[in-house]
Image: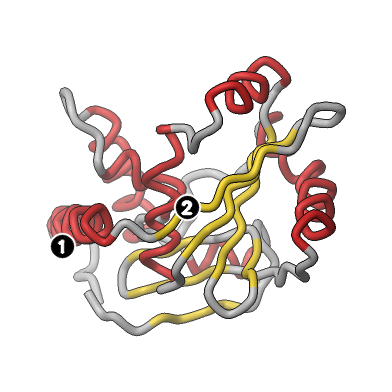
Amino acid sequence: MSDELEIFDCEQNSPEWFAARLGIPTASNFSAVLAKGEGKTRRAYLLKLAGEAITGECAEGFGNAHTERGHAMEPDARNLYAFAHDVEPQLVGFMRRGRAGASPDSLIGDRGLLEIKTKLPHLQLDVLDKGKLPSEHVAQVQGQLWISGRDWLDFVSYWPRLPLFCIRVERDEKYIETLSQAVADFVGELDTYIERFGVKAA
């Protein structure tokens, strides 16, 4: 895949944002690309993206209660982080590298990213107790670092009236190499479906 980074200056969850990520694997779903076992999760994601690429229509929007809660609370978490670290987070729409993309919650300076998760109280307490990046977010975090080309990402987990959790995650080049190859293989499989059932991929 191309190494050239494209940045789309649009609001996340806007029609332009959905159009920029249509039919390509994104960091929030890189865990599905890496999924092992029977491969049902990976196949389901593969078919979803193939359907998007062939029809030009988004398979689904982000409208469940969890994502709506996250969107509502994200500005508060960002402001708390900005005050604690004396920085000015810069909003970004979508970042695309070849046939893969990512939507970090903010850019921090020239080399950093910010990713915010809102977690229910019992989940936030678990994150605070363990004091490390939850394993279910590793693929997304390293994927954002790969796509963006940046050096580190501050992962923030938030729930009102509980302490803010923040941990800095550095690039893991070995992980990123494995991830980028897995995504390239995934895109190759995606193209076989597009070529078989629809128009030839560009």
Q: Which residue is drawn at 60% across and 21% down?
A: 129
Question: Hey, what amino acid is under mark 2?
Answer: Val
170 lies left or right of 187: right
Give the label on residue 195, or none.
1
Colour mapping used in the image: secondary structure
When the figure is inspected, residue 198 is found, relative to residue 129, above or below; the finding is: below
Residue at which label 2 appears: 169
When the figure is inspected, residue 190 is found, relative to residue 123, above or below; the finding is: below
Between residues 13 and 2, which one lies in front from this camera angle? 2
When the figure is inspected, residue 192 is found, relative to residue 123, above or below; the finding is: below
Q: Which residue lies furthest to the bottom in this view?
A: 4
Judged from the image, the secondary structure of the residue bearing numbered disc 1 is helix
Find residue 82 and report its horizontal and vertical position in percent: 79, 60
Give the label on residue 1, or none.
none
Q: Residue at x 32, y 39 (%)?
A: 32
Find residue 170 and report its horizontal and vertical position in percent: 43, 58
Residue 197 in sight in this render? no
Q: Residue at x 17, y 24 (%)?
A: 37
**Are the residues flagged by discs 1 and 2 in contact, CB closer than 8 Å?**
no
Between residues 201 and 78, which one lies in front from this camera angle? 78
Q: Residue at x 47, y 63 (%)?
A: 21
When the figure is inspected, residue 90 is found, relative to residue 172, above or below; the finding is: below
Find residue 132 and report its horizontal and vertical position in percent: 50, 35
Lower sequence index among marks 1 and 2? 2
Judged from the image, the secondary structure of the residue bearing numbered disc 2 is strand
Residue 175 in sight in this render? yes
37 lies left or right of 17: left
Question: Hey, what amino acid is under mark 1?
Answer: Glu
Find residue 15 and report its horizontal and vertical position in percent: 64, 64
Q: Which quadrant holds the C terminus?
A: bottom left
Q: How far apart are marks 1 and 2 (CA)?
A: 38 Å
